Image (cartoon, rainbow, N blue to C red):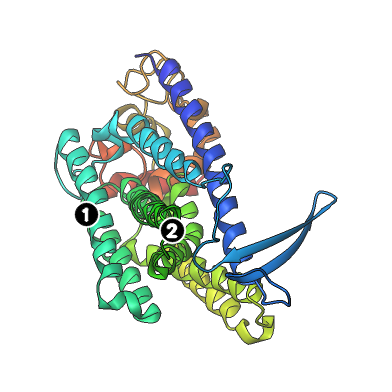
Amino acid sequence: MTAFALDWINLAIRWFHLIVGIAWIGASFHFVWLDFSLRARENMAKGVYGTSWLVHGGGFYHVEKYLVAPETLPNDLHWFKWEAYLTFLTGFALLIVQYYWNASAFLVDPAVMPMTGGEAIMVSVIALLAGWIAYDLLCRSPLGNHTGWLAVAVFVLIVGAAFAFTHIFSGRGAFIHVGAMVGTMMAANVFRVIIPNQKKITASLLKGETPDAKYGKIGKQRSLHNNYLTLPVLLMMVSNHYPFLYAHPAPWLVVALIVLAGGTIRHFFNRVDAGDTPQSVAWTIPAALLALGVAIWWTAPSTRMDQAQVSDAEVLALTQTHCVMCHQAHPTHDGFKGGEPPKGVMLDTIDGIRKNKAQILAQAVQGNAMPLGNETGITADERARLGAWIAAQ
């Protein structure tokens, strides 16, 4: 398959993934807001837990929520599930096209853990399944009845997985797997818990039985988990564009800080939507800013530059050894053969290197995202010499 065709497949899947992901996130945010906005009012119908009034698009809406289910159901009952299912399926397809297709370059870093591309794919699939199983067991354990302790346990699970991934995969591979694992947990919540529980409630109702309220309670718990995890997942999914996130010791700490920041930001909006005053949850804002501030400090590149004198010829030799298989007019790397150089960056001349020095500094000196998977075995000393040359320009 040519690089051009693969790029179009990647773009088409990514576009579809964004579309259905926006639909899922929008529905999730809306229904959590709707649930928090419910109020008990006079003259509510039998079995109604609360109602909410909304205005949008020039019209008014009156929504009622039944704690279990109404006595009868209409034929046009809508199930919100395909948004989640398609987000997962397109996300996994994107993982295949972007990471599995050339796993030796995108997932493997020999300096982290020497393994083949096939072995990395196998570990990836097992990790996604294991993440869901561990999370589900936590929710079903006695911790599931204690919101605070369950939140701590899920946080530890995510950070622990991040620690493991950063010791198995390349930096970008590790971060994308944190996002993929949490995204799998969220989609599985819908597929394995929320929708099945709703079907049990519906089946009981159709039989003339009183549905068990526990199914609705469990479904709400998992739905709320999805809501709080959304913001961290979104950042993880775009992390491959920002190598500074993982180009330093202990990148798993950045994951922890991102989860804390995203979770506290979401908590602020959820509690205000529930009727709390902004002042009562104002602590979440400095908490989120503190987490982000620590993350910025932790990921800041070193200001020290090697003062060695590095010639143009030496830098050109370095790029010929480590860069031009991808970054030339006609790439020879298997992942880009027959196509254009990534992002149009060409490093086969001094002028090309000088033109793209900012990207080289970010990707190959301050970060270790390039060369992909460090296939060429560039050393720390060579990265430092590239940095010294750039500093002298």
Label 1: element kind: helix
Query: 273 or 160: which is nearer to us?
Result: 273
The amino acid pointed to by label 1 is: Ala
Disc 2 to disc 1, C-alpha distance: 39 Å
Which three-letter amino acid code belongs to the residue tagged 2?
Gly
* Label 2 vs 1, first from the N-terminus: 1
Residue 309 showing in the rendered view: no
From the viewer's perspective, tell me whether residue 244 is left or right of residue 335.
right
Q: Which quadrant holds the N terminus?
A: top left
Residue found 52% across the figure and 73% down from its top? 264
Q: Which mark, residue 334?
A: none
- Residue 132, how many percent across, how many down? 28, 55
Which residue is under mark 2?
208
Please name the residue that numbered disc 1 is placed on: 130
Q: Tell me the quarter of the picture where residue 43 sits.
A: bottom right
- Residue 302 vs 179, above or below: the answer is below
Instruction: For mark 2, give the secondary structure.
Output: loop
